[in-house]
């Protein structure tokens, strides 16, 4: 790596040193910057050619430098002769101005070390191109080393030399005297130019007379730079010491031979014995056959043979050579026309430019880029010619690489992008928009190309708008998304809404439909589809365009329309449009077909969603059931014990079956618990319940076992017979119904039952689950006051009109049947007539008890009590007796106490107050008033 850098450094240093030493101190360097050494030319390739630029204008030039070190070997007078010859040639070239002569930009300047002058930009000399690399930098540039002349270049180059000679011979009356490949320069555009007027001879006669050109005798003692190249010199120069215009034509013939033979001249001349060489050459020329000219194209072979004729008068003149068929090649003619373009008027130019696209494909790319493109772009300053020139420039751009396009074409197109007149310029650019977007850098696209498209959409010409809308889809994929979303789409929408042309509106919709695939789904749903509802026109073509956009969006894999959009916006818009009177049958069928597709997808998607929701709900329910499984198992066991008594008392005291305060509190807490967010402790508890539920699922279901209570060791007194006798005696009594006064303890109210105290009645099933008879109940007489209306049976109907006032006790979740006790001693008894106890006759009648009175009378006391008491150890069944809500009142209709748990000892050891039937009768009187 280091060696390569050193080599590069030495090369750069050497080149810099060569340039510095060559032009240092020369006045040319005051106005021009000298670049690298690129070629060589002139007589003996003595002139080095450098790149250069003018300091003031940055105009590109070529700097010709003759280094005086090349002639250090000569004596002083020889040096002076060489310098004078070189100066004469440059000064003559400077005075002459013609397109076929090399143009001098700055005259010759001399310094102590060199001679220098500046010309138009140069590529190389013809000798360099043909392989003569003398006085070139080492290594030779690949541009020259690999350069090959195309046929059209050769033809037109020779034609240019012929035209230059015609100018010299006819107009200037001058013989060049040294037409050689060294003195033919190829400029940067590829044109062949004549230089090297060191040995030119002007006519000595006045311009009106026949020109006469004096000739000097060949002096072999002069330095070679003071003599013309004898290999391209006509024989008469040496043999007869004469010259004329035909002598230059001989030289042209030798040049043509060399061009077609890779730079090799037709004869090699021995400069030491030049007369002998030319004598031999003369004999060969007289016997010149077609075999010697085999490499020359057949159509020009005879003309070359004529040019090499020994007799000068036989040779064609320059003007005749320009008209030979060989130069009628379409490429050469085209290039020739470009060179004379400045002489043509606009009509001639327009006709030429119209036919140029047919010629361009036949020409080599290098010729087009170097020769034709600069001529075309120079016409951009003429607005009237731009519509004729621009298609050719864009056609050339298609064949160029991106780098060539950016370097050579894009800078010339910049001003044209901004031209709005004539309107054809915009049309041409729109037709080639894909080319521009492909090869133009992104910054230039944003700054120059897209603004031109926007102007086209806003143009007043309907034709321009239509063309723009038709072309936009062809290059939409090349436009960046932000520009399309924020600049292009809004202008298309405005063109659709604001235009009065049906064609523009329809084309706008078609354009939008074609570029939907390049847009984002949500942009289409939020911006494009709502825009369709703003279109005021109802023509069939517009309606079909709207339908097309809907259908494209609906069916496109990337886009699609959501079911919410379908149901809320699309279908409500499409269905009214489908019945427009302007639509024909086919158009209506198209609408209906799309609407059906949308409805089918809407149905399927929403149905799928609902099915999924249903599945999720079922899964959630199953999970909730698992969480409540433990409570459900306990409820099943409770129901088994409660159903036995509930069937006996299912129609008793329906007013008391509507639920109690405690039940409402429990339900309210449950609902509140479900709605409110759970605390950490509640979540932990819920998790434990789920674990228990999972364990219960994996276990066998538990079956409740009925345990027969063991009789107490101490026998209790049998009160059954006494109770039955007292009840029988009570039923036989005839009691008249007393009328309750207004001053009575009870206030009369309408017979509304207890249902008025609750928002909703509670069904029997729920009461069985939550308010069933608890196994741990005992009877109590105090704590409940209930008046009895003798006109109503207290337990015969669901509602009890006789109830007028009640006192609610504290609810209890675990009630207990305590022993029946005597009322408090201090209790005030209201004196009234004996109460009609016929209600007791129906106590076990309508309810269809499982055990009849006769069977009860025959049972033992414990056996009768066990009908109401569940087995010991079984789960509690609630808190009501005969369906009466215990938790609502605190006591039952029989005065049951609801606090302590039930125990068999409560029945095994009755209070001493119940020792005879009279005490039991008193208790019942207290109970029923």
Image (spheres, rainbow, N blue to C red):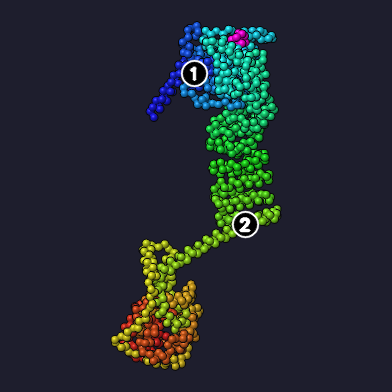
On the image, the x and y values in percent for residue 925 come to 40, 87
On the image, the x and y values in percent for residue 499 come to 66, 44
Of residues 46 and 607, the one nearer the viewer is 46
Using residue 726 as the reference point, say whether residue 566 is left or right of it: right
Give the crowd class for mark 2: few <14, some 14-19, many >=20 residues within 10 Å.
Answer: many
> For the N terminus, which image quadrant?
top left
Q: Which residues are magenta?
A: 236-243
Q: Is residue 237 magenta?
A: yes
Residue 654 in view (yes/no): yes
Of residues 27 and 712, the one nearer the viewer is 27
Residue identifier under label 1: 135
Q: What is the count of numbered marks?
A: 2
Which residue in the rendered view is the most extreme toward the top?
77
Give the number of the mark in front: 1 or 2: 1
For the point 47% across and 7% down, the residue is: 75
Q: Tag 1, which secondary structure?
A: loop
Q: Mark 1 vs mark 2: which is more N-terminal?
A: 1
Q: Is residue 844 magenta?
A: no
On the image, the x and y values in percent for residue 368 come to 60, 29
Residue identifier under label 2: 595
* Distance in Å between CA atoms under marks 1 and 2: 84 Å
């Amino acid at each position: 790596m280091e060696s390569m850098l050193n080599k590069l450094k030495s090369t750069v240093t050497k080149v810099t040193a060569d340039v510095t030493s060559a032009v240092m101190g020369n006045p040319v360097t005051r106005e021009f910057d000298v670049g690298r050494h690129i070629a060589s030319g002139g007589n003996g390739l003595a002139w080095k050619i450098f790149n250069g630029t003018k300091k003031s204008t940055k105009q590109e030039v070529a700097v010709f430098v003759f280094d005086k070190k090349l002639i250090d070997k000569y004596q002083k007078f020889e040096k002076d002769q060489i310098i004078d010859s070189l100066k004469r040639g440059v000064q003559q070239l400077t005075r002459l101005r013609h397109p076929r002569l090399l143009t001098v930009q700055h005259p010759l300047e001399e310094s102590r070390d060199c001679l220098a002058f500046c010309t138009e930009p140069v590529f190389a000399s013809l000798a360099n191109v043909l392989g003569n690399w003398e006085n070139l930098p080492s290594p030779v540039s690949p541009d020259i080393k690999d350069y090959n002349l195309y046929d059209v270049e050769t033809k037109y180059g020779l034609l240019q030399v012929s035209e230059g000679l015609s100018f010299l011979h006819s107009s200037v009356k001058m013989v060049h005297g040294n037409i050689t490949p060294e003195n033919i320069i190829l400029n940067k555009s590829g044109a062949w130019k004549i230089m090297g007027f060191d040995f030119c001879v002007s006519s000595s006669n006045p311009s009106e007379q026949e020109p006469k050109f004096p000739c000097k005798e060949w002096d072999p003692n002069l330095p070679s730079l003071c003599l013309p190249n004898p290999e391209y010199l006509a024989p008469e120069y040496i043999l007869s010491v004469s010259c004329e215009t035909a002598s230059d034509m001989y030289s042209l013939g030798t040049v043509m031979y060399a061009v077609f033979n890779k730079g090799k001249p037709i004869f090699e001349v021995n400069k030491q014995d030049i007369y002998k060489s030319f004598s031999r050459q003369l004999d060969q020329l007289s016997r010149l056959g077609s075999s010697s000219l085999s490499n020359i194209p057949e159509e020009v072979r005879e003309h070359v043979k004529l040019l090499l004729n020994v007799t000068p008068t036989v040779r064609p003149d320059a003007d005749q050579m320009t008209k030979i068929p060989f130069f009628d090649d379409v490429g050469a003619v085209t290039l020739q026309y470009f060179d004379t373009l400045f002489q043509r008027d606009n009509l001639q130019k327009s006709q030429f430019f119209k036919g140029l696209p047919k010629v361009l494909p036949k020409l080599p790319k290098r010729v087009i880029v170097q020769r034709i493109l600069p001529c075309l772009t120079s016409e951009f300053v003429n607005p009237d010619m731009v519509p004729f020139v621009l298609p050719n420039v864009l056609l050339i751009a298609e064949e160029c690489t991106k780098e060539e396009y950016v370097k050579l074409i894009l800078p010339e197109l910049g001003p044209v992008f901004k031209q709005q007149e004539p309107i054809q310029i915009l049309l041409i650019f729109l037709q080639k928009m894909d080319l521009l977007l492909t090869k133009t850098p992104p910054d230039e696209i944003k700054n120059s190309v897209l603004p031109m498209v926007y102007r086209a959409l806003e143009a007043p010409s309907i034709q321009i708008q239509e063309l723009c809308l038709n072309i936009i889809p062809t290059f939409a994929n090349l436009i960046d998304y932000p520009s399309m979303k924020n600049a292009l789409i809004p202008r298309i929408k405005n063109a659709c809404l604001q235009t009065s042309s049906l064609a523009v509106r329809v084309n706008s919709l078609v354009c939008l439909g074609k570029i939907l695939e390049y847009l984002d789904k949500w942009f289409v749903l939020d911006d494009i589809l709502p825009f369709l509802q703003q279109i005021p026109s109802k023509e069939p073509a517009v309606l079909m365009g709207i339908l097309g956009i809907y259908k494209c969006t609906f069916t496109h894999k990337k886009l699609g329309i959501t079911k919410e959009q379908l149901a809320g916006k699309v279908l409500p818009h499409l269905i009214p449009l489908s019945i427009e009177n302007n639509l024909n049958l086919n158009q209506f069928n198209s609408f209906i077909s799309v609407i059906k597709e949308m409805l089918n997808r809407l149905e399927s998607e929403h149905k799928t969603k609902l099915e999924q929701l249903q599945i999720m709900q079922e899964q959630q329910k199953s999970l909730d059931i698992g969480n409540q499984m433990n409570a459900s198992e306990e409820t099943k066991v409770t129901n088994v014990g409660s159903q036995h008594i509930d069937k006996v008392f299912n129609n008793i005291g329906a007013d008391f079956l509507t639920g109690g305060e405690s039940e409402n509190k429990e339900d309210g807490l449950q609902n509140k618990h479900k709605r409110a967010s759970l605390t950490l402790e509640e979540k932990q508890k819920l998790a434990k319940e789920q674990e228990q539920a999972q364990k219960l699922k994996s276990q066998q279901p538990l079956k409740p076992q009925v345990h027969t209570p063991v009789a107490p060791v101490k026998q209790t007194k049998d009160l059954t017979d006494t109770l039955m006798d007292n009840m029988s005696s009570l039923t036989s009594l005839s009691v008249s119904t007393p009328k309750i006064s207004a001053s009575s303890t009870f206030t009369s109210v309408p017979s509304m039952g207890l249902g008025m105290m609750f928002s909703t009645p509670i069904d029997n099933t729920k009461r069985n689950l939550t308010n069933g008879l608890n196994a741990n109940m005992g009877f109590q007489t105090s704590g409940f006051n209930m008046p009895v209306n003798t006109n109503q049976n207290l337990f015969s109907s669901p509602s009890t009109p006789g109830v007028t006032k009640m006192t609610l006790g504290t609810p209890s979740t675990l009630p207990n049947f305590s022993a029946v006790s005597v009322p408090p001693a201090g209790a005030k008894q209201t004196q009234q007539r004996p109460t009609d106890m016929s209600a007791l006759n129906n106590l076990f009648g309508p309810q269809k008890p499982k055990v009849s009175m006769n069977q009860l009378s025959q049972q033992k006391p414990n056996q009768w009590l066990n009908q109401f008491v569940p087995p010991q150890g079984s789960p509690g069944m609630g808190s009501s007796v005969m369906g009466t809500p215990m938790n609502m009142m605190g006591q039952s209709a029989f005065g049951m106490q609801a606090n302590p748990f039930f125990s068999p000892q409560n029945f095994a050891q009755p209070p001493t107050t119940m020792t005879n039937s009279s005490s039991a009768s008193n208790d019942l009187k207290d109970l029923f008033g």
